Image (cartoon, grey):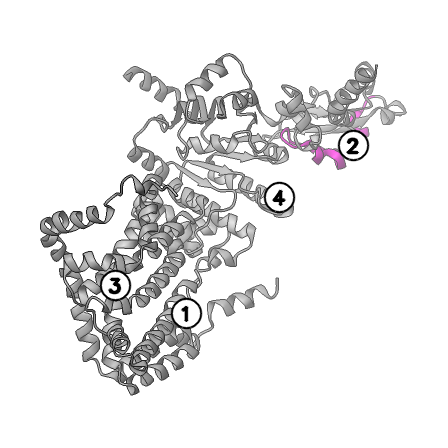
Amino acid sequence: MKSLTGKAFTDGMANKVEAKNIFKIFGSEPDRVFEMVSKGHSKADIHAETGQTIGVNDASFEVAEGEVFVVMGLSGSGKSTLVRMINGLIPPTRGQMMIDGVDVASCSAETLRKVRREKVAMVFQHFALFPHKTVIDNVAYGLKVKGLPAAERRERSLKALAQVGLEAYADSYPEELSGGMQQRVGLARGLATEPEILLMDEPFGALDPLIRRDMQLELLELQRSLKKTIVFITHDLNEALILGDKIAIMKDGSFVQVGTAEEIVGEPADEYVRAFTQDIDRSRVFEVAAIARPPLSIEIDAPVSDALARMEAENVDAMFVTDKGTLQGQVLYRGLSGASDPEALAQHLDPDFATVTPDAHLHELYGKAAAGRPIAVVDETGAFTGIVEPGDIFHQLVRGEEHESGQKRAATA
Amino acid sequence: MFSPSDLFEIPFGDWVDSAVKDWLVPNFRPFFRSLQAPISFVLDGLDGFLNAMPMLVFTAVLAFIAWRTAGRGVAIFTALALVFLDLIGVWGQTMTTLAMIVTAVFFCAVIGVPVGILAARSDRFLAILRPILDVMQTIPPFVYLVPIVMLFGVGTVPGVIATIIFALPPIVRLTNLGIRGVRADLVEAAYAFGSTPSQVLWEVQLPLAMRTIMAGLNQTLMMALSMAVIAALIGAGGLGLTVNTGLGRLDVGTAMEGGIGIVILAIILDRITQSFAERKAVATPSLAQTFRGFFKPSRMAARAADEKPA
């Protein structure tokens, strides 16, 4: 037993949250359900047969430190149950839930309270602010429960409120604030105890679309400096794709697919996931790196004829020119073919060319691609790492549609 | 026509009679007598205090409380009504009844709120408690007057005990209801931040259930007042005794003097306690805060100014 926990600890060094074969069964005879699960019966069958519900069916996942793990699913998929098992609000029927090497599924009530006070905070869908407490007292709640003195509580809560831009409202009551502001208070309450892990259960689900958008961007902004480990629950795939480093798609209590945004949209595991990804704006999912070609360039002292020959060989209309590896500009086939002086490439150089970073999303390229010339991919160190051909952008965007229309054709045939 | 009682009869009355007279009274009388001590302590203190207080001082104090809690109208009514009671010559009895009622309500709260909290936390305890509360609320008080006299004797304290039994159920029920009615996600949030069960109770459940608990206190108070006359049957004094005296002598006037006293007390106490129950979750500014507000711009005004350009 000792070696087992020791192993879990070393394995869990980088992983803040580690779920191992988590099950949750709502009902009085879980053993009967386990038997049916092992025989491969579906959630609906088991409910019809035994009257018991499988909340979560054999979920395993790891969340690394500083990572945003998004669980996406429709209502009833078990995602809210799953997030509540991470901080022990709902005890799993089977399985281990390791938080920094502590199994919250089997630890004592005292240990569980310690984990909740020091490691894991939670933000709720309907804010769950205490209506009888002022904003600052709400934010300070976790610190009060920990037994901190009033002055320190106030100081740390004001700091947390400042992070969400609401320090001016410290002495208001929650009902005096708008929905978006209330959820910011909820977020500040989660941040005040300085937890390493933040659980967010559909935190923006109750907000208007525009405010939801603002809050998502604000959370990304905050996360850039805070680097918390976040488990984020949502029913909105767009939200999942914007926020998630890793996304799990959940259905009937099981994970259907776990992967990055590009993996989910680019290679959906099954029809269920594909159905979700249909309406997704692919230009906001895919990054430049996904479509970049190898950096095709020519040194500035090369003869024009060489450049023309290479462009013909590669079947491109333009080419980047470098001087000892540093980007200088672009030459066009059209410009070179009528060149009077075939020796000097530098004369035909167009220093006005577009660049992007490898992690830019495709929608950021539209304006730059309008000229129809290749775009240079330059990473943060200034190195020239690839080329984006404008045609490739649209090719990547229509790939999902091609699949669909191909299917329709197959169906009609 | 045949009926089961032709075959045999159950001597139910005899059983109860012997259970009380031959078992409960001989074995537990000292125990029940000792229960009187705290009640008698609070009651005697309160009765002495209220009767020693000058009539005008008391009227001013109660009118001030009514003004702060229920508003100007109730305050004026309180002052006029109390003066009226003094003029018709039942001031002493009114104070005695008030002392009895306040004592009974105090013990109802001391017993009823914790019992209600337990009931809110355990479905099993509630399942046991509910039929007991049903019996307490529906059994006619005259039925338990006899065993109370046997166990506690006659006098004002046994009268208060009968009042407590009669008036206890609402505060237990509404405490239970109030705590169970606290939004589940708020309780969940409190636990999610690592609260102990008692921290959840004090920080979240009790404050949010307070309005419902106050409504229960108001109901308990009204029921206690309605026991004033019945309690006088076993020797309690006050306005109830005045009513009973009038009843015995078929003296409409005397009975009415006692009756109007009870009605006036009921109205005043009801309005004041109802205002506790209706009080908003957001605190109203105190008198001192209101005065301070005249000399510096208030928070609300400052915020309104902030928001205007936006």
Q: Which residue is denoted by mark 3 in the rendering?
A: B104
C-alpha separation, residue under disc 2 versus residue under disc 3: 96 Å
The 10 Å Cα crowd at callout 1, few under 14, some 14 to 19, many 20 or more, is: few
- In front of the other: B71 or A12: B71
Pinpoint the chain carrying mark 1.
Answer: B
> Closer to the observer: label 2 or label 4?
4
The residue depicted at 31 percent of the width and 42 percent of the height is B6
C-alpha separation, residue under disc 3 versus residue under disc 1: 32 Å
Q: Can residue A157 be seen from the camera position used here?
A: no
First in sequence, mark 2 or 4: give its number. 4
C-alpha separation, residue under disc 4 versus residue under disc 1: 38 Å
Q: Which mark is residue B285?
A: 1
Q: Is residue B287 above or below residue B153?
A: below
Looking at the image, do the residues carrying marks 3 and 1 touch, with CB atoms under 8 Å apart?
Answer: no
Q: Secondary structure at mark 4?
A: helix
Question: Left or right: B152 with respect to B115?
Answer: left
